[in-house]
Image (tube, rainbow, N blue to C red):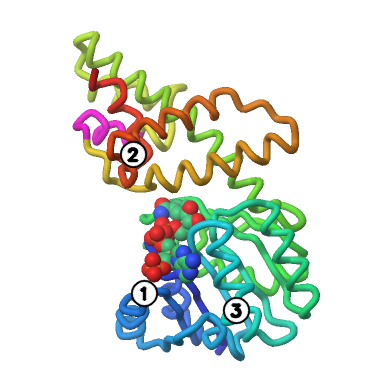
Amino acid sequence: MTKAAFIGLGVMGYPMAGHLAAKGYDVTVFNRSAAKAARWAAEHKGKRAPTPREAAEGAELVFTCVGNDDDVRAVVLGKDGAFAGMKQGAILVDHTTASAALARELEGAGKAKGIGVLDAPVSGGEAGAKNGKLTVMVGGESAIFDRARKAMECYGLAVTLMGPAGSGQLTKMVNQICIAGLVQALSEGANFAVRAGLDARRVFEVISKGAAQSWQMENRHATMLEGKYDFGFAVDWMRKDLAICLAEAERNGARLPVTALVDQFYKHVQAKGGRRYDTSSLMLLLTKD
Ligand SMILES: NC(=O)c1ccc[n+]([C@@H]2O[C@H](COP(=O)([O-])OP(=O)(O)OC[C@H]3O[C@@H](n4cnc5c(N)ncnc54)[C@H](OP(=O)(O)O)[C@@H]3O)[C@@H](O)[C@H]2O)c1
């Protein structure tokens, strides 16, 4: 039985760790608020530890899925972080959406200790995590990827090595850039349909069969038309991700005019109290005067 540790039992991490346990991995979990770890351990007949260091002791694979760059540093590089407990030859897989610079920093720190590191952000949301159908975009060395791939396939439908350290995070940035402009366009289309006096639901039933089709259109148009915005990825998380994209673009010279604009729209949603609304809440800036 492969010994594994999972650190960060949030919306994503909780079910991902559950899939590992269900597939026979010997999983020890850590979560900052201990109640979640206790609930997970009871539900999955697994073990929990009081620090990331202790969770990681003896593990061959250590997974993290926390919030942002600094959260990852806290649970990996801190005094009681995972690296302090990991043995030589073990592998850290970071599923947090973070910067490419952090991925390279972790890889360097891991190399100094003989620990392999992969950056492996995911896409597919809470539903994808629960039903084990995430897309996992991985950066790192292929020999390390080959050893961790089977474990990631416990919750990943598509697990792909994109290139050296940071490439997983860069791929996730492309994903978020593509979504940002698309959700604004979908909001504008939905609002236009309503104001034009059309049956907006029928409009989307029809055009989602054609060239305008998208995951966002198929999965979100109905709730957007009802003004319901609690169906997934939060605006706070999206702004964190867009900040990462915009900072990376400053470095590589890519122009992101629409992404920068949509980021400002999300800032407006936050100011209206929508920090935990899902990303389709761009619609409310159009429907409410
Ligand atoms: N939700 C999605 O649909 C989705 C989709 C794709 C990618 N992601 C990305 O996946 C990551 C996790 O998202 P999530 O939705 O699972 O977030 P979440 O529900 O807010 O959970 C965050 C987890 O990280 C822990 N954490 C945060 N900061 C920490 C720190 N400094 N030290 C120790 N633990 C810390 C939290 O512990 P506590 O329980 O103690 O707060 C919690 O377990 C984020 O990077 C997010 O951008 C999310």
- Please report the residue visible at 77 percent of the width from the left and 80 percent of the height from the top: 113
First in sequence, mark 2 or 1: give its number. 1
Instruction: Identify the image quadrant of the C terminus.
Output: top left
Question: With 274 as the anchor, is 101 left or right in this view?
Answer: right
Q: Secondary structure at mark 3?
A: helix
Residue in the picture at 31% in, 78% down: 35
Residue bearing mark 2: 219
Name the magenta segment's main secondary structure.
helix
Q: Is mark 1 within 8 Å of ligand 1?
A: yes
Is residue 190 among what the camera can see? yes
SS for dot 2: helix
Q: Name the residue: 70% across, 51% down.
A: 167
Q: Is residue 274 above or below residue 17?
A: above
Front residue of this view, candidates 82 and 197 = 82
Q: Position of residue 110 (x, y in %)?
A: 74, 73
Alpha-carbon span between mark 3 and mark 1: 17 Å
33 sits left or right of 55 in the view: left
Q: Which region is colored magenta?
A: 218-227
Q: Tell whether position 222 is magenta.
A: yes
Residue for badge 3: 82
Q: Which mark is residue 33?
A: 1
Query: Residue 117 magenta-drawn?
Result: no
The amino acid type of the residue labelled 3 equals Ala
Return the disc, 2 or 3, that comes first in the chain's sequence: 3
Q: Earlier in the sequence, mark 3 or mark 1?
A: 1
